[in-house]
């Protein structure tokens, strides 16, 4: 009986820790616009004033943020394609995947997967789908706090230089009897951290 019960508790601990890990990972996006959650360049992850080593600033968001729609997504894709390095030289960066909260899943699906333009009476093709400029489509992150915010991951993150997660110690679970009380003690341990090394790995908007 104790073995069966113990296994259930260990599984419950693992599920709880997995949920915590998802929350911690999403915190990077949930705080991406916060001035109190800054990166190595001294500004928030998503900002209009990322300082460049060669002088001047660069942005990974629109000056005026907008809700997710065809126009705002196209503008974001264009902005990403014109990212520069620290010397101000244009580099080859492509958006790879759209990340949305559950509240925007239907909007994202209509924009990306309709044959024709979304939300218009025009018979134009869906240029975003037709050109394949967003090869990873979209994904839903259930741990995002802002129902209007959306994010675009880029090829910089895919190459390991944008958003980062370090797994320092894999999850370990164990249990042992307590001689004094007769209870069974359970513990679970894991070490990891989330962050980013290059703001070019993501583009975002908080919505209008």
Image: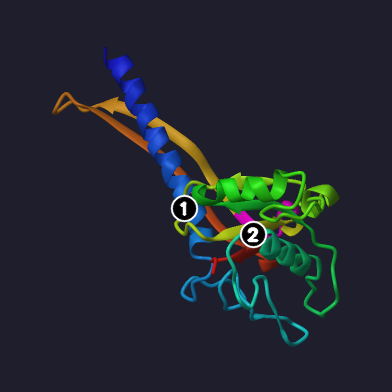
Q: Is residue 42 above or below residue 124?
A: below
In this orientation, which residue lies closer to the viewer: 158 or 190?
A: 158
Q: Is residue 33 above or below residue 30?
A: below
Q: Residue drawn 38% across and 38% down?
A: 16
Q: Nearer the viewer, residue 69 or 172?
A: 69
Q: Nearer the viewer, residue 5 or 190?
A: 5
Specify whether 173 is left or right of 138. Answer: left
Q: Nearer the viewer, residue 57 or 98?
A: 98
Q: Which residue is mark 1?
A: 24
Q: Position of residue 144 (x, y in %)?
A: 48, 54
Estimate the x, y position of residue 98 in percent, counting from the top left: 66, 52
Q: Is residue 133 visible?
A: no
Residue name at image x 53 percent, y 72 percent: 38
Q: CA distance from mark 2 to mark 1?
A: 28 Å
Instruction: Assign a secondary structure to mark 2.
Output: loop
The magenta segment is: 157-164
From this viewpoint, which residue is outermost toward the front?
A: 121
* Residue 195 numbered mark, or none: none
Marker disc for residue 69: 2
Kindly indicate whether the residue at mark 1 contacts the one at mark 2 (C-beta within 8 angstroms): no
Can residue 50 be seen in the rendering of this structure?
A: yes
The nearer-to-camera label among 2 and 1 is: 2
- In which quadrant will I find the C terminus? bottom right
Residue extending furthest toward the top: 1
Name the image quarter holding the N terminus. Answer: top left
Residue 18 relative to residue 82: left or right = left
Image position, residue 199 (x, y; %): 66, 67
Judged from the image, the secondary structure of the residue bearing numbered disc 1 is helix
């Amino acid at each position: 009986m104790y073995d069966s019960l113990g296994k259930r508790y260990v599984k419950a601990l693992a599920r709880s820790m997995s949920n915590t890990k998802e929350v911690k990972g999403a915190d990077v996006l949930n705080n991406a616009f916060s001035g109190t959650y800054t990166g190595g360049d001294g500004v928030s992850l998503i900002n209009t004033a990322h300082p460049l080593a060669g002088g001047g600033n660069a942005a990974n968001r629109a000056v005026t943020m907008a809700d997710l729609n065809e126009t705002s997504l196209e503008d974001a894709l264009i902005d990403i394609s014109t990212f520069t390095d620290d010397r101000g030289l244009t580099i080859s960066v492509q958006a790879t995947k759209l990340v949305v909260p559950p509240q925007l899943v239907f909007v994202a699906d209509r924009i990306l997967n309709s044959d024709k333009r979304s939300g218009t009476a025009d018979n134009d093709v869906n240029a975003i789908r037709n050109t394949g400029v967003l090869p990873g489509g979209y994904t839903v992150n259930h741990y995002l706090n802002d129902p209007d915010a959306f994010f675009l991951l880029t090829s910089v993150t895919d190459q390991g230089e944008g958003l980062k997660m370090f797994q320092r110690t894999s999850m370990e679970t164990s249990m042992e009897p307590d001689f004094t009380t007769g209870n069974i003690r359970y513990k679970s341990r894991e070490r990891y951290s989330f962050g980013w090394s290059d703001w070019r790995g993501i583009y975002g908007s908080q919505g209008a």
